[in-house]
Amino acid sequence: MNNEHITLYGRPITKKNSSRIVKCGNFTKILPSKQYSQYEKDCIRQIQGSKKKNICIPVNMQCIYYMPTKHRVDLVNLLEATCDILVKANVLQDDNVNIIKSHDGSKVLYDKDNPRVEIEIKEIVSEV
């Protein structure tokens, strides 16, 4: 596998900190916010056919988030949302520890004019 580079444009949104409670008859469900659902749709739309590799080998996934404001964000929640989006878009087969071995080098930076996430997926050749 070659290294994969994917850039997803738009303000990165976490999945967990923006949930909504919806009543379905006698049951209640916790769903992601409308903003997250829209962000997820936009990201999946940006991922073109050649990027849909359904990767199932051990990889390091480095994500650099460029946020539009300098407000504090939760990097772990951003990574989880990104992994879920990549699985849903068939870039990754699953987001478990057998496939995504690490998120080394992931960080949050500031870019007011062009919020995005730059994702670098590298195959891990040998494990220690």
Image (cartoon, rainbow, N blue to C red):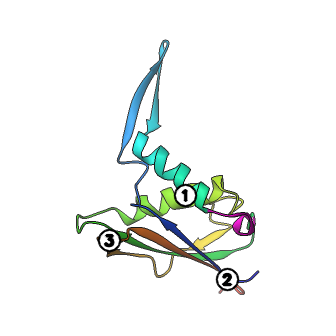
Could you tell whether 82 is left or right of 116 in the image? Answer: right
List the single residue furthest toward the front: 113
Q: Position of residue 122 (x, y in %)?
A: 64, 81
Q: CA distance from mark 3 to mark 1?
A: 18 Å
Q: Position of residue 118 (x, y in %)?
A: 50, 74
List the single residue furthest toward the left: 71
Disc 2 marks which residue?
A: 3
The image shows residue 59, relative to residue 90, as above or below, that is: below
Disc 1 marks which residue?
A: 43
Disc 3 versus disc 1: nearer the observer: 3
Could you tell whether 72 is left or right of 7 in the image? Answer: left
**Neighbour tally class for label 3: few under 14, some 14-19, many 20 plus, Cα within 10 Å:** few
Q: CA distance from mark 2 to mark 3?
A: 27 Å
Q: Dividing the picture into quarters, in which one does residue 44 lie?
A: bottom right
In the image, residue 50 lies in the stretch drawn in magenta: yes
Residue at horizontal 69 percent and vertical 74 percent from the top = 58
Say whether marks 3 and 1 touch (CB < 8 Å): no
Q: CA distance from mark 1 to mark 2?
A: 19 Å
Disc 3 secondary structure class: loop
Which quadrant of the figure contains the C terminus? bottom right
Magenta region: 47-53
Residue at horizontal 49 percent and vertical 56 percent from the top = 81
Disc 3 marks which residue?
A: 113
Disc 2 secondary structure class: loop
In the image, residue 107 lies in the stretch drawn in magenta: no
Which quadrant of the figure contains the N terminus? bottom right
Residue at horizontal 44 percent and vertical 47 percent from the top = 36
Identity of the amino acid at label 2?
Asn
